[in-house]
Image (cartoon, rainbow, N blue to C red):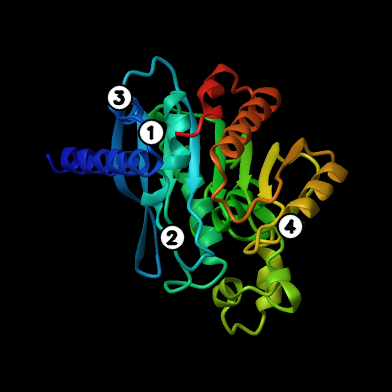
Amino acid sequence: MANRQRSLIALALLASGILLEVAASGQSLESAGHATEILNRFRAIPNVTYVTANNWEAKLDVYAPRDAAAPSPVLIYIHGGGWVGGMKETAWTLIMPYLEAGWSVVNVEYRLARVSLAPAAVEDCRCALRWVYRNAKQYNFDTSKIVVTGHSAGGHLALTTGILPASAGLDRQCPGSEDLKVAAIVNWFGITDVVDLLDGPNMKEYAVTWLGSMTNREEVARRTSPLTYVRAGLPPIITIHGDADPVVPYTHAVRLHEALSKAGVPNQLVTIPGGKHGGFNREQSVNAYAAIRDFLSKHTAIKQDTAAAEKKP
């Protein structure tokens, strides 16, 4: 009964978020009704503990299709907030298109700086990926069709989750024998060079806070920077970034795109002209989702599954 109540609460939270967006944007209640109908097709299993570290339980939410005839593609969503804030419960605007397409969604929280400094968030998200592998049978996940995504710091964590080699030494929080591969990464204006944000013209308070006063902070920053791990054989990566972003420099996206291209990794940079740190208008968002759909269809085995992922709720 308790699990059932938690599931209903989780679905209610998503539905209430939809209704608020509808009210704010002037859309019809028909849109909210359609979204609620989608949610009713899913089992919601909220606040599953996937790892305990520093006496803190890291939790995730699972949204799994009720009547899937075969294992479903999986979206792992990682929220943003500069590694110092944010919460998984704000994720519905991004995950809804994938729910509509029939995917399972795993919505992840992780240790913020107030709980543990870097590289804790990176370690936690790798543990979340391992959890997906280890629980694939129970939730009917297709581990050959895992896509990791997130915004801002969540984009950074989506990248590190999907590209870190075992040799990076950041899987020790939850060791295992699984080969942690993902089918693709969707990076929404994520940080790609943490060192760049610690000093100089691009210094950001959130990055300085995440690294704290550790004496080897530049070494840790390099270990947690996606650009450090660019190499041949990585999964396809699509990046969406506004060229007027004041929070995460647009140059991070450009440098990642150039490095991936040089390494022969399938990738695409979708530039939002004049775009800030998210908050894109409807046309920009629809175009971004269409690019994501086409990219996944071209570079992964996830074909018709992504048909609805061009739409922004």
In the displayed image of the protein, which residue is found farthest to the top?
A: 69
Residue located beneath label 1 in the image: 27
Between discs 4 and 1, the one toward the N terminus: 1
Q: Distance between the Cα atoms at labels 4 and 2?
A: 21 Å
Question: Is any atom of residue 172 visible in this view?
Answer: no
**Which amino acid type is shown beneath numbered disc 3?**
Glu
Does 292 appear above or below 253? above
Q: Distance between the Cα atoms at labels 4 and 1?
A: 35 Å
Residue located beneath label 4 in the image: 252
Question: Do the residues bearing badges 2 and 1 touch, measured as CB atoms within 8 Å?
Answer: no
**Which amino acid type is shown beneath numbered disc 4?**
His
Mark 2 vs mark 1, foreground winner is 1
Q: Is residue 60 left or right of residue 176?
A: left
Q: Distance between the Cα atoms at labels 2 and 3?
A: 27 Å
Question: Do the residues bearing badges 3 and 4 touch, measured as CB atoms within 8 Å?
Answer: no
Residue located beneath label 2 in the image: 86
Between discs 2 and 3, the one toward the N terminus: 3
Q: Secondary structure at mark 2?
A: loop
Q: Secondary structure at mark 1?
A: loop
**Which amino acid type is shown beneath numbered disc 2?**
Gly
Q: Which corner quadrant of the image does residue 51 belong to? A: bottom left
